[in-house]
Amino acid sequence: MDRAQKEQVVEELGQIFDSSGVVVVAHYEGMTVAQMQDLRARMREAGGSVRVAKNRLAKIALEGKACASIADYLTGMTVLTYSEDPTAAARIADKYAKDNEKFVILGGAMGDTALDPAGVKAVASMPSREELIASIVACLGAPAANIAGAIGAPASNIAGILSTLEEREAA
């Protein structure tokens, strides 16, 4: 790899570290190509990505970034999993680590917050952005539905009374 290629890799990694909601660092020593392809496919389905890069280049890309604290995890055979959704990469990495003992989560970063393996597990257990938005909308919509029901109730009561009166007059 010549100098221009290394500079390009550092730039790409810098963009990854800037734009990702979460970055998870893991060891993948002993994994087969098929297992790595499976990890990539699962991550792609969730909207994330997997990147294997030289640790030295990743450390250079981390300089001055909010998530620079993960540089300590970059030793040995490491792989980066990342996603814009703050929980997707952590969720998939955690699930994959349970299925494959050769994939060992070292830690990660969520913005400028460093995560240890327990922190990654905690982020993985959080609901996704879409799930949070849905629950907030449900909370906001519930009072409106109750108000609409309360406003509509007297009208239906009056309609019921009128129909009862009509039935009495008809009888």
Image (cartoon, helix red, strand yellow):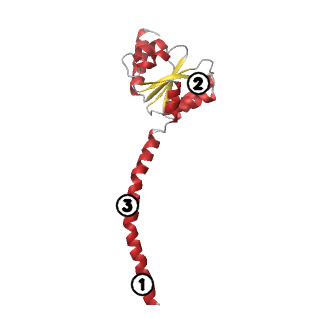
Q: Indicate the quadrant where residue 8 lies.
A: top left
Q: Position of residue 20 (x, y in %)?
A: 42, 28
Residue shown at the point (39%, 64%) measured from the top left: 150
Q: Indicate the quadrant where residue 26 lies.
A: top right
Q: Mark 1 sits on what residue?
A: 165
Q: CA distance from mark 1 to mark 2?
A: 75 Å
Q: Position of residue 126 (x, y in %)?
A: 49, 36
Near mark 1 (Cα within 10 A), the count class, few <14, some 14-19 or many ≥20, is few
Q: CA distance from mark 3 to mark 1?
A: 28 Å
**Amino acid at pointer 2:** Met
Q: Is residue 128 above or below residue 158?
A: above
Give the camera-side residue of 107 and 37: 107
Precedes in sequence: disc 3 or disc 2: 2
Q: Say whether residue 41 is visible.
A: no
Q: CA distance from mark 3 to mark 2?
A: 53 Å
**Amino acid at pointer 1:** Leu
Disc 3 on helix, strand or loop?
helix
Disc 1 on helix, strand or loop?
helix
Near mark 3 (Cα within 10 A), the count class, few <14, some 14-19 or many ≥20, is few
Residue shown at the point (42%, 9%) measured from the top left: 3
Q: Indicate the quadrant where residue 98 lies.
A: top right
Q: Mark 3 sits on what residue?
A: 147
Residue shown at the point (38%, 62%) measured from the top left: 148
**Total labels drawn:** 3
In the rendering, which numbered label is found on residue 53? none
Near mark 2 (Cα within 10 A), the count class, few <14, some 14-19 or many ≥20, is some
**Amino acid at pointer 3:** Ile
Precedes in sequence: disc 3 or disc 1: 3
Disc 2 on helix, strand or loop?
helix
Q: Mark 2 sits on what residue?
A: 36
Q: Position of residue 135 (x, y in %)?
A: 45, 46
